[in-house]
Amino acid sequence: MATPRYWLIKSEPSVYAYAKLEEDGRTEWTGVRSFEARNNIRAMTPGDLCLYYHSNEDKAVVGVACVLSKPGPDPTAPGEDWASVDVGPVVAFTTPVTLATIKATPALKDFPLITRSRLSVTPTPVEHFELVLKMGKTKLPATSAAKPRPKPKAKPRARP
């Protein structure tokens, strides 16, 4: 199996919090309407790991999710050229890592959350991924891939 790549994905907690992902077991990551973020989704592969960032209200990395499916068309935009993947929970952070903490950490000066702050899906260097995990006092479980549950029958959730 290929080495996983690392990503940062964002959702407002009032739209789809990490706790809801844990409750649901998986969701379609839909509603991304930026060409660069869409292209990043298209580069994702099953097994890739994602730092899950709560934007706007909390402004903190709060967990790790795993890409569960190959990219496909976004069902919230029929007939349009947008993409989505399924993601599932891996582990919630013991201590959320706030945006203020990230900005105050010199080793993260090039972290995509700072350099590409408006982008909802960005690749993340492994060094940044590992440092943010450490700052969140969180370790990946022995098997870092999420345990996939069947696709939910509910409608996909749109992301801002």
Image (spheres, rainbow, N blue to C red):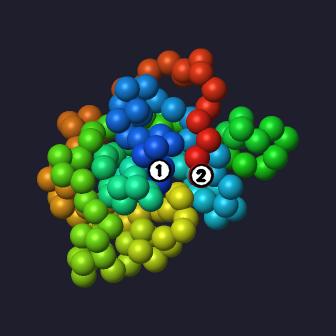
Closer to the camera in the image, 152 or 83: 152
Q: Is residue 137 visible?
A: yes
Residue identified by numbered label 1: 12
Q: Within 10 Å of the Cα at label 2, are there few (<14), some (14-19), or many (20+) other Cα atoms?
A: few
Judging from the image, what secondary structure is the residue with disc 1 in?
Answer: loop
Q: Position of residue 126 (x, y in %)?
A: 33, 62
Task: Reply above or below: 152 against 144.
Answer: above
Image quadrant where residue 98 sits: bottom left
Residue tagged by mark 2?
160
Judge whether 98 appears above or below 43 on screen.
below
What amino acid is at disc 1? Glu
* CA gap, disc 2 and disc 1: 8 Å
Residue 55 image offset from top left, x and y in percent: 44, 57
- Type of amino acid at the residue the image marks with label 2: Pro
Counting the numbered discs, the total is 2
Which label belongs to residue 107? none
- Residue at the spot x=30%, y=49% of the render? 62
- Marks 2 and 1: CB-CB under 8 Å? yes
29 vs 151: above or below = below
Q: Residue at x 23, y 64 (%)?
A: 131
For the residue pair 76 and 45, the one nearer the viewer reads as: 76
Report x, y in % for residue 6.
Answer: 41, 56
